[in-house]
Image (cartoon, grey):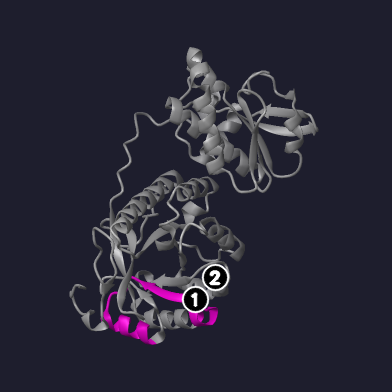
Amino acid sequence: MPPLNSAVLHERWHTPSARLAKGSGSTNIIGLSAIRRKAGSRWDKIRPGVVTRLETLLRQRLGSSDFFVPIDEIDYLVVMPGSTPDDGQICCLRIAYELFTSLLGPCTINQLDIAHAEAISDDILETRPFRIAELVEMAKKAELVLSPSPTDVVYQSIYRAPAGQPPAAAAVELSYLPIWDAQYQVIRSYQAILKGNKRFTGVETSGLNGRELARQSLEVLDKSALSLEQHLARGERFQLTIPVPYEMLASPVARMEFVAACRQLSSSMRPYLAFKLEDIPVGVPQSRLVELVAALAGFSGTLLAKIPAKQYAQSVADYQGIGLKAIGIGLGSVPNGERLREIDRLAADTKRLKLIAFLDDVGSIEIVRYAVERGINWLSGPVIAAAVDEPGPLKRLPMAQLAGDLVYV
């Protein structure tokens, strides 16, 4: 059977697995021929480990309705019934890329072995290897970091690598912002934020491309989960809130990686985790919100959404019945003269929708009193408590102590 990147435009393979490729969705093949060529004489020795690694990646990255099957020694048929052709191709490309780079280091465009597959009959599968130009466009969408390949003129002209080596990404350093429960008068939760971030969000989205945003989000998740695990081992029980930027979660490839990382978290820590959707644009349809919330469901005990204050010009009812426990707003972007009105709106809407209300960026005791009187449940910001280097445990904080720079005890 010829390799997928051969010069032949179409290949027909006789295989009983062809019938699995019938129907809608996205059907592709991931091949190992490039890894086999690169490995050379070592191939027979490393093949079992390569296959195990590929199957592990497929199980981690594919959805519940997707499946895969080997059709020969070096090629796997991947069927994604619920995906569009483009999303399925990008997903397979990302898996092929991760497999190659994790085993052999930097990858060039012509070392990505994927092809489109279509069932001609129950036992004949027709495949079409993607052209280099097609792979280049998919690699752009997947935001892969590829090594330049001097033999591929198309690659050099369309996806030219920048001169010199890019600077290494700065490591993420976190602080944890205490969140006050007005009903029980305690610090009940801590939200992960970037150290020194004045916006009080976990990931700084402005100025970041999609790949960097995804990397940063995964680092926030990883470091937050490690910290929570250490505290739980000491018997300290509290909720840790992890922010998830809308822009990152809306990218199919980034969402796939984030969800795969969530699957690796211990099930024992999930009741103590909260995921908080942030930076949601105005006018996002409910169907999109349902999709994103569903991606995180099952990995945490609480799901929240921080909505834009001007969302009230749209339909805030879109946030009801989609799996959220709480919605809230950040006062930092609301003019002083409009803050009380926004608090009134939030309180009325959450009461009607039977959701918990929260406020971020609370900067004065007057706002605290007003919000508590209106029934706002969870508050955070400078007047509540400053960010700390380590989260937890629960701490008592009566309203009377919320004055000036008084620190909770």
Q: Position of residue 386 (x, y in %)?
A: 24, 67
Please, is residue 127 above or below residue 363 in the view? above
Q: Answer with left or right where residue 36 lies relative to residue 220.
A: right
In the rendered image, the residue lying farthest to the right is 121
Q: Position of residue 404 (x, y in %)?
A: 19, 77
Q: Quadrant of residue 322?
A: bottom right
The answer to whether residue 350 is magenta is yes
Secondary structure under tag 1 reads loop
| Label of residue 55 in the image | none
Q: Answer with left or right where residue 173 lies relative to residue 139.
A: left
Secondary structure under tag 2 reads helix
Q: Residues within 10 Å of mark 1 (few under 14, many from 20)?
A: some
Q: Answer with left or right where residue 289 lies relative to residue 217.
A: right
| Front position in the image: 235 or 172 | 235
Amino acid type at image mark 1: Leu
Q: Given this view, does label 1 or label 2 mark the residue nearer the observer?
A: 1
| Label of residue 355 in the image | 1
Amino acid type at image mark 2: Tyr
Please, is residue 235 above or below residue 63 in the view? below
Please, is residue 255 above or below residue 369 in the view? above
Residue occupied by mark 2: 319
Quadrant assignment for the C terminus? bottom left
